[in-house]
Amino acid sequence: MTTLDQTTAALAEMKTVEGRADVDMETARQALEALAQRADAFSIESTQ
């Protein structure tokens, strides 16, 4: 969880240039969504 907290803080403090952030943030969002879907496979609750 510490790494997740650090990542969240870094994203909140990130400065971007107009016109470039849309693509970068969309790519990041897609990667986080894929990670969340994969993480569900490791959940103890999902195997019961």
Image (spheres, rainbow, N blue to C red):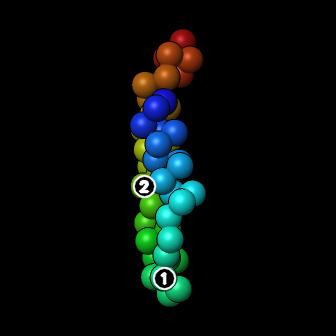
In the rendered image, the residue lying farthest to the top is 48
Query: In the displayed structure, would residue 42 be above or below residue 38?
Result: above
Residue closest to the eye, 17 or 40:
17
Residue closest to the eye, 19 or 6:
6
Find residue 33 and report its horizontal and vertical position in percent: 50, 51
User: Label 1 neighbourhood size at 10 Å, few (<14), some (14-19), many (20+)?
Assistant: few
Which residue was labeled with disc 2? 31
**Residue at horizontal 45 percent and vertical 61 percent from the top:** 28
Find residue 35 and report its horizontal and vertical position in percent: 43, 44
Residue closest to the eye, 13 or 48:
13
Find residue 36 and report its horizontal and vertical position in percent: 49, 41
Q: Which element is circle 2 on? A: helix
Tell me the kind of residue under disc 1.
Answer: Val
Query: In the displayed structure, would residue 21 be above or below residue 31?
Result: below
Which residue was labeled with disc 1? 17
Tell me the kind of residue under disc 2.
Answer: Ala
Q: Which element is circle 1 on? A: loop
**Residue at horizontal 50 percent and vertical 71 percent from the top:** 15
Query: In the displayed structure, would residue 7 be above or below residue 30?
Result: above
Tell me the number on the disc at residue 9.
Answer: none
Question: Do the residues bearing badges 2 and 1 touch, measured as CB atoms within 8 Å?
Answer: no
Q: Nearer the viewer, mark 2 or mark 1?
A: 1
**Residue at horizontal 50 percent and vertical 87 percent from the top:** 19
User: Would residue 30 be visible to someone looking at this image?
Assistant: no
**Residue at horizontal 42 percent and vertical 55 percent from the top:** 31
Question: Sequence-wise, which precedes: disc 2 or disc 1?
Answer: 1
